[in-house]
Amino acid sequence: MIRVISADDHAVVRGGVKQLLVDAGGIQSVGEAADWVELMRVLQTTQCDVLLLDITMPGKDGLTLLKEVRGKWPAIAVVILSMHPERQYAMRALRAGALGYLTKDGAPDQLVAAVRAVASGGRYVSPELAQLLADQFSDDHSKLPHEALSDREYDVLVRIGAGNAVGEIAEELFLSTNTVSTYRARLLTKLGLATTVELIRYVVTNNLSR
């Protein structure tokens, strides 16, 4: 029996995932969490094989949380279940230790297949993500400027591209407005841009929109 914990801030999503996995057979839902504090508590008290983790959990950005989980519970296989397109966060999630990445609008059978694959020690990638991986490692692949950003810098970039103000980003990421402004200035320098409008245009042009 594969033991699964689901971490998502939407109760409807957690309920739907639980029902889907139970109906598939051979999979047991052993815990749920709505935020990162609750997730830490559940992981400390509940044994599981697979963690389904939303990359936008309240209180801590998903990639930081993923790295923390992998550091404390390396035996748990993590699958990212996200509303964001694979092109945005999949590569970073895999590099951070996730064994799979699925979008919430994907086919239900993909979720079941992913849980079974990672529970048996494998990985799970969709055909679209497989193509991204192939592009990433092809000999003639040119690295784009945003691919050299840190995870936090990338997260701020995507949020700026979505039209979020500095104050909104600070609140979402639990940072000060000064810190977010510093990240914005750093992004302009690293990407060779001059204004926030150019940052937004960069995000749109490179298909990084949320």
Image: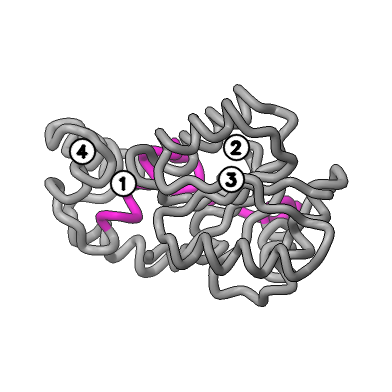
Give how far apart the Cα atoms at labels 4 and 3 are.
34 Å
> From this viewpoint, is residue 162 visible?
yes
Give how far apart the Cα atoms at labels 2 and 3 are.
23 Å
Q: Position of residue 26 (x, y in %)?
A: 83, 58
Whether tag 1 and tag 4 are in contact, CB under 8 A, the answer is yes
Q: Magenta segment, which residues?
A: 136-160
Mark closest to the chain's N terminus, 1 or 3:
3
Give how far apart the Cα atoms at labels 4 and 2 are.
23 Å
Judging depth in this view, the residue of 119 and 153 nearest the camera is 119
Q: Identify the residue at horizontal 75%, vertical 64% (top origin).
A: 112
Q: Nearer the viewer, mark 2 or mark 3?
A: 3
Residue pointed to by mark 2: 96
Mark closest to the chain's N terminus, 4 or 3:
3
Mark closest to the chain's N terminus, 4 or 2:
2
Q: Is residue 20 above or below residue 116?
A: below
Q: Identify the residue at horizontal 20%, vertical 58% (top origin).
A: 164
Residue pointed to by mark 4: 180
> From this viewpoint, is residue 145 visible?
no
Looking at the image, residue 51 sits to the left or right of residue 53; the answer is: right
